[in-house]
Image (cartoon, grey):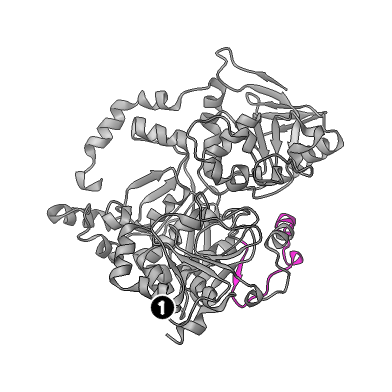
Amino acid sequence: MSNQSNPAGAGISVHTGRVAPLNQANVDTDQIIPKQFLTSVTKSGYGKHLFHDWRYLDLHEQEPNPDFVLNKPEYQGASILLTRENFGCGSSREHAPWSLDDYGFKVVIATSFADIFYGNCINNALLPVQLTSAQIDTVFAAVEQDSTCQVVVDLPQQQVRFNDQVIGFDIAPHHKNNLLKGLDAIGQTLELDDKISAFEAKQAAWQY
Amino acid sequence: MGPELGLIKPGMTVVCGDSHTATHGAFGALAFGIGTSQVEHVFATQTLKQSKGKCMQVKVTGARPLGLTAKDIILAIIGKIGHAGATGCVIEYCGDTIEGLSMEERMTVCNMSIEAGAKAGLIAPDQTTFDYLAGREYAPKGADWDAAIAYWKTLKSDDDAKFDIVIELAANDIAPQVTWGTNPGQVIGVNQPIPAPEDFSDPIDRDSAVKALKYMDVKPGQKLSELTVNHVFIGSCTNGRIEDMRAAAAIAKQGKVAGHVTAIVVPGSVAVKAQAEAEHLDKIFLDAGFEWRLPGCSMCLGMNDDILSQGDRCASTSNRNFEGRQGRGARTHLVSPAMAAAAALAGHFADTRDFVAND
């Protein structure tokens, strides 16, 4: 896999990598990272627990489940997760994108994402790419045929490219801009501090 | 706890690092869960950037039949629109059935907005809301109260407001609900048979059903009353309030917990626990063979010692029946507090309407 970053090195631009196909809808946050691993407040170290219940046959993560996609030899080193509808539903836990990122995923391609999870991805420079069901089918087919298939996810051009296919995707301009430039959302908002203070001054005390 | 203290008021924007923040929408507040980075943003700036959501109206109409609880209403809504049916939306719940709900019942409905995929769910404030807030510790007082009421009364949708999606349900069509699968949209009335994968036209729903039937160890056509329950959990932010305790106690006093069932009751807060004890509900539960616990999240998400073992089957008043939510390999069926108490006594799922009639 390779990452072509912007000159400052902080954002996402064009990512090329292999795909791990998780052919399932409604993958919830309890599956992505179960609650027993939420006891730390740092953002790293969750990758080994990613998909814990599916990935391991035992509680101590000593016995990998050979049937689970991330344990198959052909998908080692994949940096793009391909999945289906409503990915990331459930909890607001930001540990979900943290664990995907820590494992090594840079991009998640799905038919749809749960709202809170989507926002959490944007805030953690994990690129969520939404494609239609039919488009997702073509990516699954390509990966099934050749697990080494290199997929290019091009954020500036809003394209997913593989073999001879080019698929466009939508992303909100402000999300795109923040991801491309690796912007600090807090710094951006604080530039509007005068307006925030003016608004707060207008509120009646009993409202809060 | 926020509502108990009068902290949550109509028209507020309420955010918290918990997806069930939507509970506070019961007060006509825009309340939603956010991630850790967003919490940081709020602390640093007192603001949060948001994209505008779609508006969904969910209208429930008609007199509430005997034994129908707020939990059944929200589970039936999720069953109708699906687990991701409201993705990208804020739901406004309305209709005379919703207007007839108490504040605690409204909280139960709004709590599970996220289980329908919605970011938030809210109910327009009305006299029920104002009566609940009046006199609470952080509610406005004196002239401020009058000013607040005048403002809060303006917080409702226009009669000709346009919604992106409109869903309607009749209260009379809703039976006590039980989830049979591994997402909250996989739900049926207590007397309906467990569905077969072929019953779903959408291939994704069909695949999910196959997987859920296997995980839950249930068979198409099976009756819920044939499923032996060995754990019962009454509590959580969905159903841990005093009215929930009362509803469960009304059933609990009609018998004893079945021998093979471990049943725990966990009040949602210290105030709820104290109120329940003042009403001697704790004694009813203990006499019937339930455990009476200290307040907390307990078995809702199994982050503590209250976890189930592989293969356990639990009737739970919580909000998520995801695989492994209450313990690896454990099977969660979401129900109302009354249905959970009935399952504890019967040792399997039972129709609360049979108990309510006796009460």
Q: Which residue is at 58% across, 31% downward?
A: A45
Q: Position of residue A102 (x, y in %)?
A: 61, 30
Q: Which residue is at 67% across, 74% downward?
A: B193
Residue bearing the label numbered 1: B250
Question: Is residue B263 among what the camera can see?
Answer: yes
State which quadrant residue A105 falls in.
top right
Q: Which residue is at 28% across, 51% downward?
A: B7
Seen as rendered, the residue at the extreme right is A145
Q: Left or right of A193: which side holds B255?
A: right
State which quadrant residue B295 falls in.
bottom left
Question: Is residue B174 among what the camera can see?
Answer: no
Q: Quadrant of the C terminus of chain B?
A: bottom left
Seen as rendered, the residue at the extreme left is B142
- The answer to which of B238 and B84 lies nearer the viewer is B238
Amino acid residing under circle 1: Ala
Q: Left or right of A15: which side holds B85?
A: left
Q: Position of residue A176 (x, y in %)?
A: 56, 28
Q: Is residue B137 above or below residue A152?
A: below
Q: Position of residue A77 (x, y in %)?
A: 74, 28
Is residue B198 highlighted in magenta?
yes
- The answer to which of B226 and B42 lies nearer the viewer is B226
Q: Is residue B323 above or below residue B47?
A: below
Seen as rendered, the residue at the extreme bottom is B358
Label 1 marks which chain's residue? B
Magenta-colored span: B186-208
Q: Residues within 10 Å of mark 1 (few under 14, many from 20)?
A: many
- The answer to which of A7 and A98 lies nearer the viewer is A98
Q: Is residue A195 above or below residue B337?
A: above
Q: Left or right of A157: which side holds A95?
A: left
- The answer to which of B158 and B45 lies nearer the viewer is B45
Q: Position of residue B140 (x, y in %)?
A: 19, 53
Is residue B359 highlighted in magenta?
no
